[in-house]
Amino acid sequence: MRSLWRSILLLALISCSTDSTNRNPYLLEVNFRFDVNLNLPSYLELNNIGNPDYIPNAGVGIRGIFVMKAGLSGSQYVAWEASCPNHAPNSCSTMMIDGQNAVCPCDNYTYSLFTGQLLNRPDDGNRYYDLLFYRATQSGNTVIVSN
């Protein structure tokens, strides 16, 4: 009987999730798909490396998305959530593009639109999050952004 309990305990310990992903507690998981037609005049700048575009469409991300051509070969696109990753969505948490960075007006945190990293991370011992990444794949003249 004792070995049965040991086996059950061992099975329970093994089956416990050890998911090491650290999901951002401020930004909820949203499912969406958005097709960016690179032939449309509003998205022509996305054909050039380092020219980000803000897409504020309802249902696309939480507060919209930033899309940018970022690959060295010119064939890779990146997409990021436009809601500041270090605040629950509120009246000031929609970020703005500043060159090739995004800036949160709540606290003036600056994020790279190439890497998603918080560039002016405070050294105060608190946990800070980088931009929330969305999948961006190119198919012909369309960039498909999804989560």
Image (cartoon, rainbow, N blue to C red):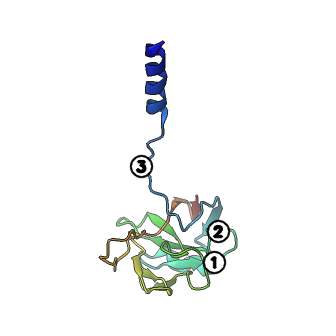
Toward the left, the furthest residue is 123
Mark 3: secondary structure: loop
Residue 60 point in image, percent of width and height: 64, 68
Residue 124 point in image, percent of width and height: 32, 76
Q: Amino acid at mark 3?
A: Ser
Mark 1: secondary structure: loop
Residue 100 point in image, percent of width and height: 41, 81
Q: Residue at x 49, y 58 (%)?
A: 23
Q: Are marks 3 and 1 in contact (CB under 8 Å)?
A: no
Q: Residue at x 63, y 64 (%)?
A: 35
Q: Are marks 1 and 2 in contact (CB under 8 Å)?
A: yes
**Residue 123, numbered circle:** none
Toward the top, the furthest residue is 1
Residue 65 point in image, percent of width and height: 57, 72
Which of the image's four quarters has the C terminus? bottom right
Q: Earlier in the sequence, mark 3 or mark 2?
A: 3
**Residue 56, numbered circle:** 1
Specify the quadrant of the image occupied by residue 41.
Answer: bottom right
* Residue receiving disc 3: 20
How packed is label 1: few (under 14 Cα within 10 Å), some, or many (20 or more)? Answer: some
Specify the quadrant of the image occupied by residue 7.
Answer: top left
* Residue receiving disc 2: 60
Looking at the image, residue 108 lies above or below residue 35 = below
Toward the right, the furthest residue is 58
Pick the residue in front: 130 or 75: 130
Q: Earlier in the sequence, mark 3 or mark 1?
A: 3
- Residue mark closest to the camera, 3 vs 1: 3
Q: Amino acid at mark 2?
A: Val
